[in-house]
Image: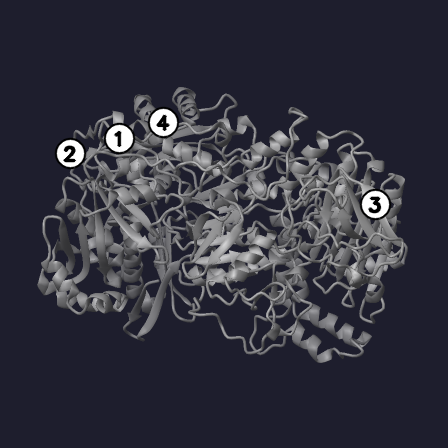
């Protein structure tokens, strides 16, 4: 943020980006001359369409000034795509281009601050956009600019015989407001000017090399090392040391430099083609395919010579014309879990094939390919750089002089530590993807000499461009898709179905260096309904034809720093305001892939969150949403850019954030970081045995084998595409080196970190047989030779399965699929997962008499259902299915005593209070209890992390190591909080993950206060989490089950209902009936606190989850209607049309808005309704009828009732595409 002092009041003013909510305050600044100069404008529309909108405010956040800039003139008779021709026909300057010019469309300010505001807005604009050189102002003829603008803008001279216009053009030039940096050779005399600058930013050089290091460095200049300074008015404000001494071989080992020809000159002996790999590694994951597409572009570099431009003596090597490597780093190639699981679940296969559940996917050890480059070095490095803060936005001015010092080198490189924030200089560089593992703990940035060229131009493609575009995309995997769409554009400008298509090329010195193809977005209604695009645009200010769909985007990495300018020009030339790009999951249909190619400008786009959808009842008919809203399509992740974002830089974070475990908490943590639109995390890495969830294609049985916590639905992973932004390491954390900050994976590979987040959760582990004597006498747990809760450390039999994720489920189903029909399966456990697994096996064709469910005793008297009605019905269902059920049993042993260790299980024996049982067993599935994985525990324990039954953390997720955080069921709070029963197990995993991410963001988000160290905790209180715990499952007998309850310490239901403040219970139907059983529990405040559903019919679980926390009055007076006998079936009642708004994803926001309305007042000194309620309410007796009447009168008289009704109507009106079943004012 920029600041300046207003001389009159010496007040500090801050510049920031304008937001739509500023519009009412900006309108208060409008003066009579504003409309005369700029015409009648809709200020919200201006803010929405401006590429740069700046607001000035004081420390009280009072808005003092506003300026909005667009990339075309505000003349109604000038087409925004053709303004260059209009300008060149009237004015003489030939240096004006869309890259270096913007037009001021609106300016207002507070009268006493007008001159200062104008100057600061102009200065901020030039600093925010380093390529900007000209600001233009168009005003009607006969008027002069306001005095505040006259000082900055001067009239443009028109050409002779130029046509007359209704407006006059004024110009403001950069050098008049932002000082030009003069770059020259450094001299020893500059030492005195530069030393204070270095010392202000870092004392490391002074402490390491002494007081005169800088003077000695300048004095040591030679042909291989040069020093430059930036001078303003004979004072040095910046310093750069450059050298040709670069270890290119080391960089080639640590970074993917094939697109840059290894930073060497092309040579015939270069070896950059990777040899074919074994078949087992050919089917790779989503991001690996993307990498290979990018890497393949440069496969023919060595066969081509340099291309010489005609207009200027500038050479671009063919390696510079390739598509850049994806910014997603990757690890050693491993067999794809997607392909493995598909094979396991396919009907094809060998029945004799035996699969044993692996601990983790272990890659085959292969020697990593390192390309060989034989040419002469072609790069120099920046060894030392520093510049005064007020001139840092002009850091780019150093580069032309730097390249002139080494005319034979085409690349400038710089390496920076991971924890150093990205500074303005390297925002013009290309970040090079590091190899894994990389021994260099720094980031590498590269800039090509041709990036200095400023005549980059974007225009519509023509037929003559086809051959050059074909060469540009020659080695891209999906080049046929690009060329096919290009041919469609060149031939007809439309698809066969009539969809508008446009193609644009980026051109520099007559050479095609980029291409993009877009279509008109025909599904904008679907996108608006299913994705939160309104987080980025005010939808009503964008017409349907202004939305475009990005299909292809390829740009030469030399010009990748102009990617956002390319997008800006595409929007201007196509007359669009927004672009959307879809990313499909790896299992999508071929038809979807054929319409797109992986774009090279993905980092310039922002990911858009998907929206939760209402499950509409079938009886709505014509009152339901349109087909465009509820149609079923292949799910995809949406990325977006609009006019407001093209000049808004993201804050790049290179810190290495390593997440161990793909649990719900870990996934939510990564999702929260990735979906921060103003931040770009380059180094988020996930360590997980089976990678990211959601890579397997949907499978009806496999997806229901485990209970669902509703943290992520089956379609959510495809809509998030976290693989685009997260690096994945397949394996387990087996060791942890806190000193070196390294995680050891699979005992071999090393993953370095700056911040480690441990979210492994708890897993079902192989059970430990008690070794109890098998007698018919009662046996007590205390007499067992080995505790049933002990860790099993022996060799795990091949037919013992513990199911923790979809990949484990796929292995089990494959085993069952290729086993005899009379196979005996024993399931050991008393969790909901044991029942869902049983149902999945029944659905896969296993007969009930082949299944046995053995339940250990229940801890603390709380069963997995905690509802006698549900438990009794499920047990009755098991009996009807001929499933054997044994309760209160402990595993004593498997197989006979003389069997070899590790042999497959043939029989299992259990003890129970009346003796023992012995069951034949071909497959043994264990859901006994969850615990921390042994290898993860060993790694944490050996690293001296405090472990007290679980990993100990504080309220802000810190372990005893400040750089290691942890969350989820793996953890417990420190004993100082005195809350032993409460852990993250008691809370909603998504809420915990979001809280964890919020703590981490404090370190990186410049909009938040950054703590220097963990905050003190004087009260020692744990955080309060309010979201419900959710269990969704399909139980034996095809029962659909949903259980939603508040975070709590597990307590038997029989004890809960006896509490005086328990509240009321409303039940319709009976467990096992055709109607279905549904139990709603409202607390003492009449809000829904527990929801239990059990039905053989499918019902809308997504809808009913939304009932949690809703007051019964909002459910159409549910309590009174139920007591009057008007409600006999909750399933029907809660799916009636009136209830649809309650299930809307923005209904919670409406409730918060109304709550805020009732606890605040517009007039100072007046009491709020909340204050009145607090004064009237009696903690013991509540409100009397008279007091309630008084409250209602105040509710009406203060205007709160009308305001609430207005908010509700606005909510329904704005979201009418989701809620057309409601009547709006004027319809009746």
- Taking the image as shown, residue 1121 lies to the left or right of residue 650, namely right
Compare residues 361 and 1031 and report the one nearer the observer: 361
Q: Characterize the local packing of mark 3: few (<14), some (14-19) or many (20 or more) Cα atoms within 10 angstroms.
A: some
User: Is residue 83 something one can see in this rendering?
Assistant: no
Identify whether 201 is placed above or below 342. below
Q: Characterize the local packing of mark 2: few (<14), some (14-19) or many (20 or more) Cα atoms within 10 angstroms.
A: few
Query: Where residue 678 appears, x then y in whole percent?
Result: 43, 53
- Taking the image as shown, residue 643 lies to the left or right of residue 1142, namely left
- Indicate the secondary structure of the residue bearing disc 4: loop
Identify whether 246 is placed above or below 61. above
Tag shown at residue 475:
4
Tag shown at residue 312:
2
* Quadrant location of the N terminus in the rendered image: bottom left
Name the residue carrying label 1. Answer: 270
**Distance of mark 1 from mark 4, alpha carbons?**
17 Å
The tag earlier along the polypeptide, 3 or 2, is 2
């Amino acid at each position: 943020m920029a600041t300046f002092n207003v001389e009159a009041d010496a007040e500090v003013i801050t510049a920031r980006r304008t937001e739509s909510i500023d519009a009412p305050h900006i309108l208060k600044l409008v003066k009579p001359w504003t409309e005369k100069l700029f015409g009648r404008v809709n200020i919200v529309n201006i803010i929405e369409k401006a590429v740069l909108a700046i607001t000035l405010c004081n420390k009280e956040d009072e808005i003092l000034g506003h300026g909005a800039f667009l990339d075309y003139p505000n003349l109604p008779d000038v087409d925004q795509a053709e303004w260059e021709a209009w300008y060149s026909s009237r004015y003489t300057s030939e240096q004006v281009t869309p890259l270096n010019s913007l037009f001021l469309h609106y300016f207002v300010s507070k009268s006493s601050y007008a001159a200062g505001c104008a100057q600061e807005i102009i200065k901020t604009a030039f600093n925010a956009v380093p390529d900007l050189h000209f600001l233009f102002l168009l005003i009607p003829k006969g008027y002069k600019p306001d005095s505040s603008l006259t000082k900055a803008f001067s009239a443009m001279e028109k050409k002779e015989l130029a046509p007359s216009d209704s407006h006059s053009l004024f110009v403001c030039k950069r050098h008049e407001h932002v000082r030009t940096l003069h770059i020259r050779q450094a001299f020893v005399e500059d030492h005195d000017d530069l030393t204070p600058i270095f010392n202000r930013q870092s004392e490391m050089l002074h402490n390491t090399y002494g007081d005169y290091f800088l003077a000695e460095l300048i004095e040591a200049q030679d042909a291989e090392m040069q020093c430059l300074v930036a001078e303003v008015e004979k004072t040095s404000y910046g310093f750069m040391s450059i050298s040709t001494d670069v270890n290119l071989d080391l960089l080639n080992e640590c970074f993917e430099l094939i697109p840059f020809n290894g930073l060497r000159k092309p040579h015939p002996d270069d070896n950059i083609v990777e040899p074919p790999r074994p078949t087992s590694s050919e089917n790779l994951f989503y991001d690996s395919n993307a990498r290979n597409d990018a890497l393949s572009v440069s496969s023919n570099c060595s066969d081509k010579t340099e291309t010489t431009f005609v207009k200027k003596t500038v050479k671009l090597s063919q390696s510079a014309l390739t598509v850049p490597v994806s910014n997603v780093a990757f690890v050693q190639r491993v067999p794809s879990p997607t392909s493995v699981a598909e094979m396991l679940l396919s009907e094809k296969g060998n029945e004799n094939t035996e699969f044993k559940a692996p601990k983790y996917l272990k890659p085959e050890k292969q020697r990593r390919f390192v390309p060989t480059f034989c040419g002469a070095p072609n790069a120099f490095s920046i060894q030392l750089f520093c510049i005064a803060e007020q001139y840092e936005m002009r850091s780019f001015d150093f580069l032309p002089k730097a390249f002139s010092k080494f005319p034979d080198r085409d690349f400038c490189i710089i390496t920076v530590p991971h924890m150093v924030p990205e500074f303005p200089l390297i925002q013009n560089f290309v970040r090079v993807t590091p190899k894994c593992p990389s021994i260099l703990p720094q980031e590498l940035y590269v800039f090509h000499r041709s990036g200095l060229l400023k005549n980059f131009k974007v225009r519509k493609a023509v037929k003559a461009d086809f051959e050059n575009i074909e060469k540009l995309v020659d080695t891209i995997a999906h080049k046929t898709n690009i060329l096919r769409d290009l041919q469609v554009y060149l031939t007809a400008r439309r698809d066969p179905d009539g969809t508008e298509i446009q193609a644009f090329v980026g051109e520099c010195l007559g050479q095609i260096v980029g291409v993009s193809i877009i279509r008109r977005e025909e599904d904008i209604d679907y996108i608006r309904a299913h994705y939160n695009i309104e987080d980025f645009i005010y939808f009503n200010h964008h017409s349907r034809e202004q939305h475009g769909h990005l299909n292809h985007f390829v740009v030469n990495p030399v010009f990748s720093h102009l990617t956002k300018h390319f997008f800006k020009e595409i929007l201007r030339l196509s007359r669009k305001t927004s672009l959307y790009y879809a990313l499909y999951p790896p299992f999508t249909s071929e038809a979807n892939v054929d319409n797109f190619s992986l774009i090279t400008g993905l980092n310039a786009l922002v990911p858009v969150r998907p929206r939760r959808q209402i499950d509409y009842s079938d009886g709505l008919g014509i009152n339901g949403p349109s087909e465009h809203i509820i149609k079923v399509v292949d799910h995809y992740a949406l990325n977006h850019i609009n006019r407001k974002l093209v000049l808004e830089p993201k804050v790049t974070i290179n810190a290495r954030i390593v997440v161990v475990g793909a649990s719900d908490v870990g996934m939510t943590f990564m999702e929260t970081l990735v979906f921060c639109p103003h931040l770009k995390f380059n180094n988020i890495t996930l360590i997980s045995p089976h990678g990211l969830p959601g890579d397997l294609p949907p499978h009806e049985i496999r997806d229901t084998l485990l209970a669902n916590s509703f943290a992520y639905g089956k379609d959510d992973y495809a809509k998030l595409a976290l693989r685009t932004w997260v690096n994945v390491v397949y394996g387990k954390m087996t060791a942890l080196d806190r000193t070196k900050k390294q995680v050891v994976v699979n005992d071999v590979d090393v993953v370095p970190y700056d911040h480690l987040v441990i979210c492994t959760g708890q897993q079902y582990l192989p059970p430990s047989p008690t070794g109890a004597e098998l007698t018919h006498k009662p046996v007590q747990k205390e007499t067992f030779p080995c505790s049933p809760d002990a860790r099993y450390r022996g060799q795990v039999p091949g037919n013992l399965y513990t199911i923790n994720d979809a990949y484990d489920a796929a292995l089990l189903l494959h085993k069952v699929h290729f086993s005899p029909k009379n196979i005996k399966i024993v399931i050991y456990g008393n969790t909901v997962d044991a029942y869902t697994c049983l149902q999945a096996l029944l659905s896969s064709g296993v007969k009930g008499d082949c299944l046995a469910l053995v339940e250990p005793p229940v801890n603390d008297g709380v069963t997995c259902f905690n509802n006698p009605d549900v438990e009794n019905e499920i047990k009755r269902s098991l009996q009807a299915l001929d499933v054997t059920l044994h309760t209160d049993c402990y595993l004593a042993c498997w197989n006979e005593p003389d069997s070899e260790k590790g042999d497959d299980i043939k029989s299992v024996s259990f003890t129970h209070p009346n003796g023992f049982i012995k069951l034949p067993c071909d497959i043994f599935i264990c859901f006994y209890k969850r615990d921390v994985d042994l290898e993860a525990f060993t790694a944490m324990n050996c690293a001296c992390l405090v472990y007290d039954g679980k990993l100990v953390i504080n309220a802000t997720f810190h372990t005893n190591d400040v750089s290691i955080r942890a969350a989820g069921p793996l953890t417990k709070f420190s004993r100082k909080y005195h809350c032993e029963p409460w852990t993250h197990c008691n809370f909603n995993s998504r809420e915990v993950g979001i809280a964890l991410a919020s703590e981490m963001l404090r370190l990186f988000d410049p909009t938040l206060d950054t703590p220097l160290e963990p905050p003190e905790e004087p009260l020692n209180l744990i955080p309060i989490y309010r979201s419900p715990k959710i269990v969704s499952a399909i139980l034996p007998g095809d029962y659909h089950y949903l259980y939603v309850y508040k975070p709590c310490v597990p307590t038997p239901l029989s004890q809960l209902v006896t509490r005086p403040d328990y509240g009321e219970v409303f039940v319709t139907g009976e467990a096992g009936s055709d109607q279905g059983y549904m139990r709603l529990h409202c607390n003492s405040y009449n809000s829904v606190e527990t929801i239990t559903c059990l039905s053989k019919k499918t019902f809308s679980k997504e809808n009913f989850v939304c009932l949690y926390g809703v007051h019964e009055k909002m459910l159409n007076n549910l309590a009174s209607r139920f007591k009057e006998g008007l409600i006999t079936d909750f399933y029907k009642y809660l799916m009636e049309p009136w209830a649809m708004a309650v299930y809307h994803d923005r209904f919670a926001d409406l409730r918060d808005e109304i709550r805020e309305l009732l606890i605040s007042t517009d007039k100072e000194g007046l009491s709020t309704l909340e204050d009145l309620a607090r004064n009237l309410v009696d903690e013991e007796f509540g409100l009397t009828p008279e007091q309630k009447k008084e409250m209602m009168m105040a509710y009406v008289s203060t205007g709160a009732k009308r305001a609430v009704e207005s908010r509700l109507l606005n909510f329904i009106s704005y979201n009418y595409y989701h809620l057309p079943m409601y009547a709006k004012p004027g319809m009746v």
